[in-house]
């Protein structure tokens, strides 16, 4: 199974921008260089994502004008609305608890040795980050996306990629906690990840689901209740 690439993710981001009306019909997309800087990717990645949009008829190249949005895709899935309030974040956690619990359930029965090595590497990197009192946002997010890939279900992967900005919103919010609280939050998060990985290693699908749901519920409570 082919895992989503950086080009895939940029394609989704650009498609969502078109769907939201950020790039309306007949408008010109930013230049390749501007998009590369905006999304933190290479120009070759931008060109590949634009080529896919062009092949699907969503944009067209016009001499002297660059890439033009042809029309708002009518058959595309509406993007997830951005998190704009704490109530939205609460609902995002509700979604993640339901979704990621099932992802962990399937990963426990489908993971292979390469997946387990990746999970073990994550646990070790996160442990070092916590000990060094650094923010673990990127490592944490990568772990949840890696689980979706290990589920061997492309729909889980696509959903997790789509809600990644929402996940990052919650994780970045936790950085605003007092430093002592954040360090405790980070340590507990690492420990909860470790328990999820152990359940997956043992092939215990039910426990993997339960430990993931517990991890996300506790993450929610640490943000909203200071638990």
Image (cartoon, rainbow, N blue to C red):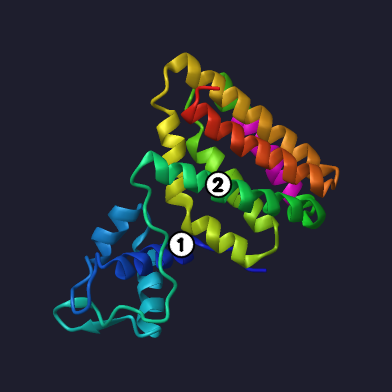
Which residue lies at the image location 80% right of the left edge and 47% below the top edge?
206
Check the picture and name the quadrant holding the C terminus: top right
> What stretch of residues is rendered in magenta?
115-126
Q: Is residue 19 above or below residue 58?
A: above
**Residue 53 locus on image (x, y percent):** 37, 77
Q: Is residue 138 above or below residue 157?
A: above
Find disc 2 in the rendering and name its residue.
94
Quadrant of the rendered image containing residue 33: bottom left
Which secondary structure, mark 1?
helix
Q: Give the left or right position of residue 62, taking residue 46 as reference.
A: left
Who is closer to the viewer here, 153 or 220? 220
**Could you tell me if the residues under marks 1 and 2 are in contact, i.e. CB atoms within 8 Å?**
no
Who is closer to the viewer here, 218 or 68? 218
Find disc 1 in the rendering and name its residue.
9
**Residue 137 locus on image (x, y percent):** 49, 36
Q: Which residue is farthest left?
A: 64
Which secondary structure, mark 2?
helix
Q: How many marks?
A: 2
Query: Of the numbered discs in the image, which one, if any, rests on residue 166?
Result: none
Classify mark 2: residues with Cα within 10 Å, few (<14), some (14-19) or many (20+): some
Question: Does residue 133 appear in this view?
Answer: no
**Residue 97 locus on image (x, y percent):** 61, 46
Which residue lies at the image location 19% right of the left edge and 79% below the top edge?
26
Does the magenta run of residues contain 121? Answer: yes
Residues at marks 1 and 2, CA–CA distance in whole angstroms: 24 Å
Magenta stretch: dominant SS?
Answer: helix
Q: Give the left or right position of residue 222, taking residue 98 as reference.
A: left
Question: Does residue 156 appear in this view?
Answer: yes
Q: Which residue is farthest front?
A: 87
**Residue 21 locus on image (x, y percent):** 26, 68
Does the magenta run of residues contain 2? Answer: no
Q: Give the left or right position of residue 12, taking residue 98 as reference.
A: left
């Amino acid at each position: 199974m082919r895992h989503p690439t950086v080009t895939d993710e940029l394609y989704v981001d650009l498609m969502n921008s078109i769907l939201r009306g950020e790039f309306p019909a007949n408008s010109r997309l930013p230049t390749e260089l501007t998009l590369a800087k905006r999304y933190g990717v290479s120009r070759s990645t931008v060109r590949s994502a634009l080529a896919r949009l062009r092949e699907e008829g969503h944009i067209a190249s016009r001499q002297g004008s660059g890439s033009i949005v042809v029309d708002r895709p009518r058959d595309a899935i509406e993007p997830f609305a951005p998190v704009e309030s704490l109530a939205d974040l609460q609902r995002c956690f509700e979604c993640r608890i339901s979704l990621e619990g099932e992802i962990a359930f399937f990963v426990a029965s489908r993971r292979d040795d390469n997946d387990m090595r990746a999970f073990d590497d994550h646990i070790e990197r996160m442990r070092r980050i916590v000990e060094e009192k650094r923010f673990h946002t990127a490592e944490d997010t990568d772990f949840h996306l890696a689980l979706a890939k290990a589920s061997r279900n492309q729909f889980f992967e696509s959903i997790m990629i789509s809600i990644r900005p929402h996940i990052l919103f919650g994780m970045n919010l936790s950085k605003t906690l007092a430093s002592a609280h954040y360090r405790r939050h980070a340590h507990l998060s690492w420990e909860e990840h470790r328990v999820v990985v152990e359940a997956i290693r043992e092939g215990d699908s039910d426990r993997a689901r339960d430990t993931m749901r517990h991890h996300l519920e506790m993450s929610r409570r640490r943000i909203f209740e200071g638990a």
